[in-house]
Amino acid sequence: MKTIAIIAHDGKKPEMVQFLNENRDILHAKNIRLIATGTTGTKTEAAGYEVEKLLSGPLGGDAQIAARIAEGQVQMVIFFRDPLDKHPHEPDIFMLMRLCDVHNVPLATNPATAELLVRGL
């Protein structure tokens, strides 16, 4: 079973739920396990998905996902970032992205890239 970590900044959470809904069949067919930062996970659950919720991003959720990447427990990250807003936990975000590169874990930061990765499962 593959695990995909999903994260979305506040302004991108509806876009994440829409993306998941548009790709529901693929996710179910491939038996994908979802983990998410706090509020993204709550929104994902409300849309009918089973998801393991971690802390919210600013409280350490990004770091929790980064740790799972380093431990080889996450095979893909979908992180819908809001590049037009400031985020106080920016160092955690960069650490997560760096660990994706270090451990060769695919990372999508927008719906177009995420769709290509999910369809390639």
Image (spheres, helix red, strand yellow):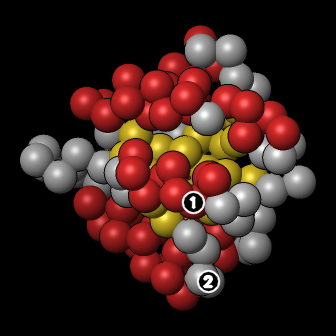
Q: In what element is the residue under mark 1?
A: helix
Q: In which quarter of the image is the N terminus?
A: bottom right
Residue 55 lies, in percent from the top left, at: 54, 39
Residue 63 lies, in percent from the top left, at: 51, 60
Which one is nearer the viewer's eye here, 34 or 86?
A: 34
Can see residue 31? yes
Q: Is residue 41 above or below residue 93?
A: above
Q: Image check: 102 left or right of 109?
A: right
Q: Which amino acid does label 2 sit on?
A: His
Q: Residue at x 38, y 23 (%)?
A: 14
Q: Which residue is drawn at 12% across and 45% down?
A: 85
- The numbered dot on residue 60 is none
- The residue that mark 1 highlights is 117
Residue 102 lies, in percent from the top left, at: 54, 87
- The residue that mark 2 highlights is 103
Can see residue 38? no
Q: What residue type is labelled 1?
A: Leu
Quarter assignment of residue 44: top right
Marks counted in the figure total 2
The crowding category of the residue bearing disc 1, from other C-alpha atoms within 10 Å (few below 14, some 14 to 19, many at least 20), is some
Q: In this view, does 14 lie above or below 2?
A: above
The crowding category of the residue bearing disc 2, from other C-alpha atoms within 10 Å (few below 14, some 14 to 19, many at least 20), is some
Nearer the camera: disc 2 or disc 1: 1
Residue 45 lies, in percent from the top left, at: 64, 19
Q: Which residue is drawn at 49% across and 26% down?
A: 17
Q: In what element is the residue under mark 2?
A: loop
Q: How far apart are marks 2 and 1 (CA)?
A: 17 Å
Q: In this view, does 7 lie above or below 109?
A: above
Q: Quadrant of the C terminus?
A: bottom right
Query: Given the current orientation, which residue lies at the most extreme bottom position?
Result: 102
Q: Residue at x 67, y 43 (%)?
A: 35
Quarter assignment of residue 41: top right
